[in-house]
Amino acid sequence: MEPVAGSLLVAAPTMSDPNFARTIVLLLDAGHDGALGVVLNRPTDLEVAAVLQPWAGVVSGPDVLFSGGPVETDSALAVANVPDDDEPVGWRRVFASTGLVDLDVPVELLASAVSSLRIFAGYAGWSAGQLEDEIADGAWYVVPAEESDAFGADPAGLWATVLRRQGGQLAMLATMPSEPTMN
């Protein structure tokens, strides 16, 4: 599968970069100029209310910021599910009913349209050709996303969950210990 907006990058069990070890990245944009996404399974301890108070009542649990990646960690991106076919002001569809929220739009304009929302500090980014090279080197598996991936109740278990649902050899990787030499 090609890396396109709305697909997931699953870090290979051998990923050595600590920023991405055992992560699931939702691609928000991918093209000839590069790719951008957010890590879905790295919640922080910082409550949304402490940083973006107006959005605290809209976020899906856990009510914390997620570490979206190592790039621009002082900025925030929000991903939301809007189940209606309407596209409210301040929301841009990425795939199905999942899209990006403009956090500068007044929360009142979006709150009633959003069924799930997560806020990410920073993002993951790749320059032109970089992601494709990493995929070719076996660092990432590209798989289809499900709408619930970005908002699941168990972010820590997402890596294994996504691998298991792929079946075959990818499903077997879900049971690989994080330190195979310690097995």
Image: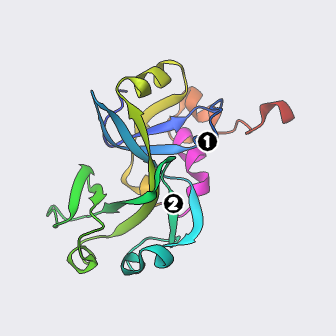
Q: Nearer the viewer, residue 62 or 16?
A: 16
The residue wearing badge 1 is: 22
| Mark 2 residue type | Phe
Q: Is residue 154 inside the magenta stretch?
A: yes
- The residues tagged by marks 1 and 2 sit, at their Cα atoms, a distance apart of 15 Å
Residue 112 image offset from top left, x and y in percent: 25, 78
Instruction: Identify which residue is drawn at 22% across, 61% down.
Output: 91
Residue 101 image offset from top left, x and y in percent: 28, 62
Mark nearest the camera among 1 and 2 is: 2
Q: Quadrant of residue 55?
A: bottom left
Q: Nearer the viewer, residue 154 or 63?
A: 63
Q: Secondary structure at mark 2?
A: strand
Report the side of 138 relative to 90 (left or right): right
| Mark 1 residue type | Arg
Report the side of 98 relative to 169 (left or right): left
User: Eyeballing the image, is 71 above or below 168?
Assistant: below
Q: Secondary structure at mark 1?
A: loop
Q: Which residues are magenta?
A: 152-163
Q: Earlier in the sequence, mark 1 or mark 2?
A: 1
Specify the quadrant that holds the N terminus: top left
The residue wearing badge 2 is: 66
Query: Answer yes or no: do the residues labelled 1 and 2 have beta carbons within 8 Å?
Result: no
Q: Is residue 183 visible?
A: no
Q: Nearer the viewer, residue 137 or 103?
A: 103
Instruction: Identify which residue is drawn at 39% across, 49% down.
Output: 146
Residue 161 image offset from top left, x and y in percent: 56, 47
Residue 166 image offset from top left, x and y in percent: 50, 36
Q: Is residue 48 inside the magenta stretch?
A: no
User: Eyeballing the image, is 82 above or below 180?
Assistant: below
The secondary structure making up most of the magenta span is helix
